[in-house]
Structure formats: structure tokens, C-alpha cells
Image (cartoon, rainbow, N blue to C red):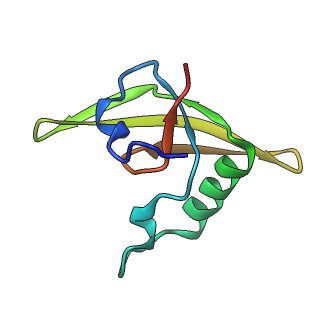
Amino acid sequence: MNYDPELWKTLKLGDRVKVMSWPTEFDAPNYTLHEETREAYEWLLARRYVLTIDRVEYHDGQSYPWADFVVTTYGVDAYHTMMLNHSGLELVE
């Protein structure tokens, strides 16, 4: 299935998305991805978890969507906030 790699640029407050594929940006040479971030993306991918855009920040004329979510593992909650400025996203109607 093809996903719009630029979808993130059009997201607005309240939009719902899923991470449907590993962001290609993460595989770029010299790209550093923290272990906790990698684990969060793997969790989102495995569960096709729906994220809701709960804030949008603007820098240099570009909007940057953010989502907060909670991962519960063995009864322990891990709170995450993530900027979704990458490929691999699909809009949920």
C-alpha cells in the first residue's frame, strides 16, 4: 500500500493517524534513533495504534504535529509524546 510521505505536513489538531510502516527517514545514514523511540515505533507498528494529533507547533511557516500516547507493558505505563514529522503515516477516517 502506498502512503503519502508528506501527509504529516497537512495534519491538524484532532486528526487521527496510524504508523503503517517504518519511517524511511530513520534509515538514513548517520540518523540517530534513541532506543526508547525505536521501541515506541515498534509498538505502534505492531498494534496499528491510532494516534490523535493533540497539538501543532509552527516553525518557519511549517506545521509540526504532535501526539501523546501511553504504552502499558506488564502493568507499567510509559508516557510518550512524539512529533510525527515523517513518512509511514496513514490518516484514519
Quarter placement of the C terminus:
top right
* Residue for point 56% across, 53% down: 21
Q: Viewed as shown, does residue 63 lie left or right of 48?
A: left
Locate residue 87 relative to residue 34 in the image: left or right.
Answer: left
Return the residue nearer the eye: 18 or 66.
18
In the displayed structure, 18 sits above or below 55; it is below
Name the foreground residue: 60 vs 77: 60
Q: Position of residue 11 (x, y in %)?
A: 36, 29
- Return the residue found at the far bottom: 30
Could you say which is closer to the camera, residue 64 or residue 10? 10
Q: Residue at x 27, y 33 (%)?
A: 57
Say if 19 sits above or below 63 in the image. below
Q: Position of residue 15 (x, y in %)?
A: 46, 22
Which corner quadrant of the image does residue 60 belong to?
top left
Q: Name the residue at 46% across, 18% down.
A: 14
Q: Nearer the viewer, residue 61 or 91?
A: 91
Q: Position of residue 86 (x, y in %)?
A: 39, 51
Tell me which corner region of the image, top left, top right, bottom left or bottom right, holds residue 26: bottom left
The x and y percentages for residue 31 are: 38, 74
Q: Quadrant of residue 47?
A: top right
Residue ranking furthest to the left: 60
